[in-house]
Image: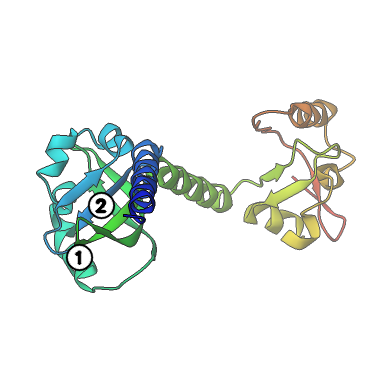
Amino acid sequence: STLFPYTTLFRSDIADSEARYRQLFEHLPMPLWAFDRETLKFVAVNDAAINHYGYSREEFMAMTILDIRPADTVDALRDYVGEGRQGFRPANVWKHVLKDGTVIDVDITSHDAEIGGRACRLVLARDVTAERETEARARLLARAFDSSTSGMMITDARTNDRQITYVNSALLRMTGFTQDEVVGRNSTFLADIDTEADTVQAFRSAMIRKVGHAAVLAPAAHHRVDRKSVV
């Protein structure tokens, strides 16, 4: 048949395309899997998912997506999948459980996919556990910094004039300045002329260091808006 060579070429192109997509799926450096929307069973998982979650490919294939969720989130997941929404779904953070029992926070993005004639969902998972823990610590430190009864400021060590980037509430109350009046200025403008020399030197030395943070605890005097000194 005249069409035979073209049919063979077409099938070859399809096979090549499938092989390329399979390789992309398998080698993506983030956990990726597909599950059957009706049965919720895993139908494909990539190497990153196997390495990150600790299950073998065979174990995954015998599981459903409910098996990697904490028990108290299963009903919410069933409702979420049962909504039947099509197409791309933006990231949502869910709790997942690794094979060793560790609970992690995962940012999930998904899209419809048809695999073997079955309606499936392709899922990309990004572990954000460390990121969320860092954010939580940062919020805790920020609250501690701002609620301290001691006047404190943060300066940018990368700038030559060590610009102030933040001042806590206590220092604002002491000096009478507002945050907008202080941020962006050289921190030495707050120093009083009567501040002891060794305190000024300690302050300058702490700011000269380009890395890390340093605290200077000393009875330094600061200017108020009314030009009076406050210790």
Crowding at dot 1, Cα within 10 Å, few <14 / some 14-19 / many 20+, comes out as few
Q: CA distance from mark 2 to mark 1?
A: 19 Å
Q: Which badge, 2 or 1, is on the more N-terminal residue? A: 2
- Amino acid type indicated by mark 1: Ala
Q: Is residue 38 left or right of residue 129?
A: left
Query: Is 99 left or right of 196, judged from the image as shown?
Result: left
Q: Position of residue 97 (x, y in %)?
A: 21, 44
Residue 67, percent across and down? 13, 48
Secondary element type, mark 1: helix
- Label 2 CA crowd tier, 10 Å (few <14, some 14–19, many 20+): many
Query: Which residue is denoted by mark 2 in the rendering?
Result: 34
In the rendered image, the quadrant that contains the C terminus is: top right
Residue that numbered label 1 is attached to: 76
Residue 141 locus on image (x, y percent): 51, 45
- Out of 184 and 182, give the one closest to the viewer: 184
When asked about the image quadrant of residue 174, the answer is bottom right
Question: Image quadrant for the N terminus?
Answer: bottom left
Could you tell me if residue 127 is visible in this image? no
Rendered position, 223 above or below 56:
below
